[in-house]
Amino acid sequence: MTPPGVLEALGICSEDEQLYRALLARPDSTATDLAEYVDWAATRIGRHLRSLLTLGLASRTPGRPARYVPAAPEAAVELLALRKQAAIVEARLGASVLSAEFRHPDAFTVVRGAEAIAQRFYQAQQCARDEVLILDGPPYAVMPIEPRRPRVVNYRTIYDMASLSEPGELAAARSVGCRILRDVPLKLVLVDRRTGLLPTGPEVVVELGPSSLLDALLRLFELLWQQASPLTPSTRTGPLTGEDRQLLALAAAGLTDQAIARRLGVAQRTVERRMQRILKALDATTRFQAGLRAGERGLLV
């Protein structure tokens, strides 16, 4: 039975590794010895021995018949890893050249199919260096836009009110410092202000590069961000508790007491009682007035 591969991640094929392991078990073997040991044809043995020599996994002794010595595993793996790293660096440097060949002003690419779209959303966010901006809302015919946080990347997400129908969803959104807006007009992911992913239909996403359209979408996001209500309460001191500020933020976004109760996981009477306390604390007679006064005091920012 062929032993499980351990060098595949370094680009070594399974047959090369199998022969390398045979050589580790029988150092100083000739090609004939190895052919008998692994039960391969002479041409197959010769082909993979040449591969091992090229990879630095084996060396050949002088004289006839030639004998083959395996490289020490620690040194061989280190060399292969260094070559892999060098190839990755070279590929990254070449990416800018490929991008220049692929993109031109206002260029776009269409991504189709649920699997391809899911992979592209994941790749875009994993490659983010500075920030990811997200407009998120139903319907989720393909997939929900789910923030992933590689390294230290700044995320700003605007959720449609309908996205946060359960208390757990609302708590998760608050934990990452997002905002909520009634009727988010579209779904969108903007990565490092250079890439945009715009769903345009069932299982269809348009990917945008640097362009006037991408600039327009960035401006739209910033306008909606200013209009959206914060879900993360302010840490500033004031007459409102953290729960009060959360409730008032939802009310400012236009939710009814019943909807707020459902999202916070409390009874509607509890919401009504807290709202009366908020109005009194802010010396306001209406919710609109309370929202204005909380905003002026920086309690919702």
Image: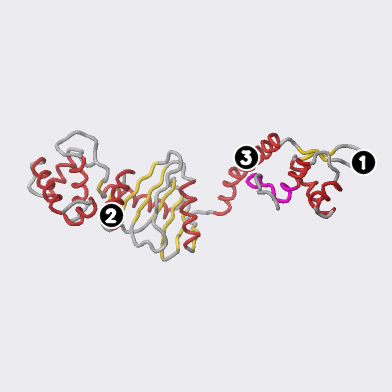
Tags 1 and 3 in contact by the CB under 8 Å rule?
A: no
The residue at the point 40 percent across, 51 percent down is: 215
* 108 drawn magenta: no
* 8 drawn magenta: yes
Q: CA distance from mark 1 to mark 2?
A: 77 Å
| Total residue callouts | 3
Residue 30 is marked as none
Secondary structure beneath dot 2 equals loop
| Mark in front: 1 vs 3 | 1
Compared to 184, does 295 lie above or below? above
The residue identified by callout 2 is 166
Looking at the rendering, the stretch of residues picked out in magenta corresponds to: 7-18
**Other residues around mark 1 within 10 Å, as few (<14) / some (14–19) / many (≥20):** few
The residue identified by callout 3 is 85
Q: Position of residue 29 (x, y in %)?
A: 84, 42
The residue at the point 48 percent across, 52 percent down is: 209
Residue 64 is marked as 1
